[in-house]
Every structure is written in structure tokens, then in C-alpha cells.
Image (spheres, rainbow, N blue to C red):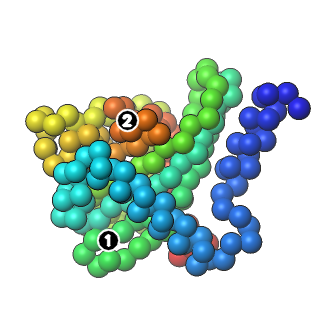
Amino acid sequence: MNRLGTICLAAALALGGPALAASKDEKKQEVRQTAQSTLDRLYKSQPKAKAAIERSAGYAVFSNFGMKILVAGGGSGSGVAVNTKAKKETFMKMVEVQAGLGIGVKKFRLVWVFEKASDLDKFINSGWELGAQATASAQMSGQGMEAYAGAMSISPGVWLYQLTDDGLAVELTAKGTKYYKDSDLN
């Protein structure tokens, strides 16, 4: 098998998600553990994010794996949205489609923060789509809302942190991304 075939096979296996034999409770626990490790990484790099998340109406944490080969690419991920007041979890999925020249495999994690319960409810019940034109720049400390330093403003009251293996991303790279409830885990 050539190198491109090996990359495709590895990506296809990774996009398949957790082992098929895992129980519903095991899958939920895996998502919770990934979410907590993501939050721990975020709080280490952006300490003020912890207070912002604790004060928020809710948040969502996702882990994504994607690949791009020549002119097409895509990815998938899973996560959990949490209503901070009610302490209610909703397990979710995401799918991403990209177009444009490139090759590679990328893993990243996303932390959404919702100031208003209505935005959290919309995210959970209607999903959220980031179109091909969606690009947001990170807010730097001292600019915008200091509590959200390092976050990208997606819309008024909705913030997004994107973490890569190298740390906090400066620009949102997700194109054509859809978020929706995980019918298998809820």
C-alpha cells in the first residue's frame, strides 16, 4: 500500500470513532474525559477562561479529527454541551467539509462558550453551522472582553476557543462545519 493509501486507511479508521464494542456509558465517559482534559489545557493557557465559563449560561467541548487529500477534505468529532445552571449534559457530534488544495491530517479541540441560555439552547436543539466564509480572529488580552482573551467571537455573546497540539489557534479554520445532537448517546 502506498503512503497516500496508508493515510486514507488511518483517517478512515480514526473517523470511525470509539470502538464499536464500547457501551453507551463507556462512550459518554470517554467524551467527558476528553472534554475535561480539553478544559484543563484551556485553563492552563488562558486562566481567565475558567471564570468566563463558570459565569456562562453554558459551554460545549468538542474533539475533532480531520484530513485533507488534494482538493477535498473533511472531519468529524464528538463532544458535550453543558448547561452550567442546570448541570445538564447533551452529547453532540460535528461534521466538517472542506474544499481547496492541500494534504494533511489535523486534530483539534473546540470550546464554545455561551453567555445567554437562548444561544446555548439554539446550539443544542438547532445545531450551528459555520459556512465557508466564517473566519474569526482571536481576541488578544486587553482588546475586546478581557475575560475571553484568546477566544474568537462567533456572534454577540458566543465565543469559541480552538486548541491545537501547538496551543491556542489564532484563527478559526473550520469551514462548512455542522453541530448536532448525538442520537445514540442522548
Q: Is residue 97 visible?
A: no
The residue beneath circle 1 is 83
Instruction: Name which residue lies at 30% across and 50% down.
Output: 44
Q: Where is residue 104 shown, x and y percent of the image?
A: 62, 29
Amino acid at dot 2: Ala
The residue beneath circle 2 is 169
Looking at this view, name the residue that lies furthest to the right: 1
Q: Is residue 28 left or right of residue 42?
A: right
Viewer-proximal residue among 20 and 41: 41
Q: Where is residue 153 shown, x and y percent of the image?
A: 26, 42
Quadrant location of the N terminus in the rendered image: top right
Q: Is residue 66 left or right of residue 50?
A: right
- Is 76 placed above or below 68 here? below
Crowding around mark 1 (Cα neighbors within 10 Å: few <14, some 14 to 19, many 20+) is some
Q: CA distance from mark 2 to mark 1?
A: 25 Å
Choose top left, top right, bottom left or bottom right for residue 146: top left
Observer-side mark, 2 or 1, equals 2
Q: Earlier in the sequence, mark 2 or mark 1?
A: 1
Q: Is residue 22 left or right of residue 27?
A: right
Looking at this view, name the residue that lies furthest to the left: 142
Instruction: Name which residue lies at 76% across and 37% down.
Output: 8
Q: Where is residue 23 shown, x and y percent of the image?
A: 66, 77
Amino acid at dot 1: Asn
Instruction: Name which residue lies at 54% across and 72% down.
Output: 28
Asked if the residue under mark 1 is in contact with the one under mark 2, i.e. CB atoms within 8 Å, the reply is no
Q: Is residue 60 visible?
A: yes
Instruction: Name which residue lies at 48% across and 60% down.
Output: 34
